Amino acid sequence: MSTAIYIIVMAGVTYLIRMIPFTFFNKKIKSRFVRSFLKYIPYAVLSAMTIPAIFYSTGDVVTAAVGTVVAVALAFFNCPLIVVALAASLAAFLTGVII
């Protein structure tokens, strides 16, 4: 029975998080600062969730750092996502084999 209560509470919280902005912000936001701030929130949240997962995924900080450096370098040069992912994984794997 407690699992059902957890699910109901989670559904309510999720609904409130999505409903509250629609009820309070029914006009267009005119402030350039607020609009630019809201524009970058998804990137900040994604980074905050991804970066810790990157460094704890391999079990070794060195292999994770090498994979991250390779991924950032390839992304900087606008390589396709599959190339970035495969090269970063390969770099982390080879670093783990060498070390």
Image (cartoon, grey):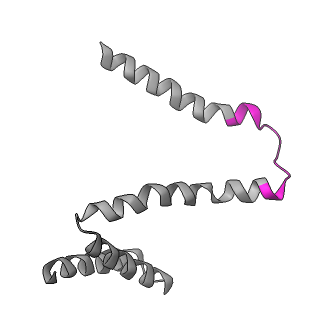
Q: Residue furthest right?
A: 30
Number of labelled discs?
A: 0
Where is residue 93? Give x, y as percent. Answer: 20, 76
- Tell me: 1 left or right of 15: left
- Residue 93's place in the image compared with 10, above or below, is below
> Where does the magenta region start and end?
21-33
Residue 48 spot, x, y in % from top left: 48, 57
Q: Position of residue 61 (x, y in %)?
A: 29, 69
Residue displayed at 73% across by 60% down = 36
- Let me know if residue 31 is in the magenta part: yes
Quadrant for the C terminus, please: bottom left
> Which residue is farthest left?
97
Residue found at the very far bottom of the displayed protein: 77
Residue 60 higher or lower than 45, as above or below: below
61 above or below 42? below
Quarter of the image for residue 62 reads bottom left
Q: Residue at x 86, y 52 (%)?
A: 30
Quadrant (top left/top right/bottom left/bottom right) for the N terminus: top left
Which quadrant of the figure has residue 39? bottom right
Residue 67, given in percent of the width and then of the height, sits at 32, 76
Answer above or below: position of 71 versus 34: below
Q: Residue at x 22, y 63 (%)?
A: 59
Position of 49 with respect to 92 (left or right) is right
Quick check: is 91 in the magenta stretch? no
Question: Would residue 94 be found to the left or right of residue 55 on screen?
Answer: left
Q: Nearer the viewer, residue 59 or 70?
A: 59
Residue 30 placement, left or right of 70: right
Residue at 44% x, 84% y: name it: 73
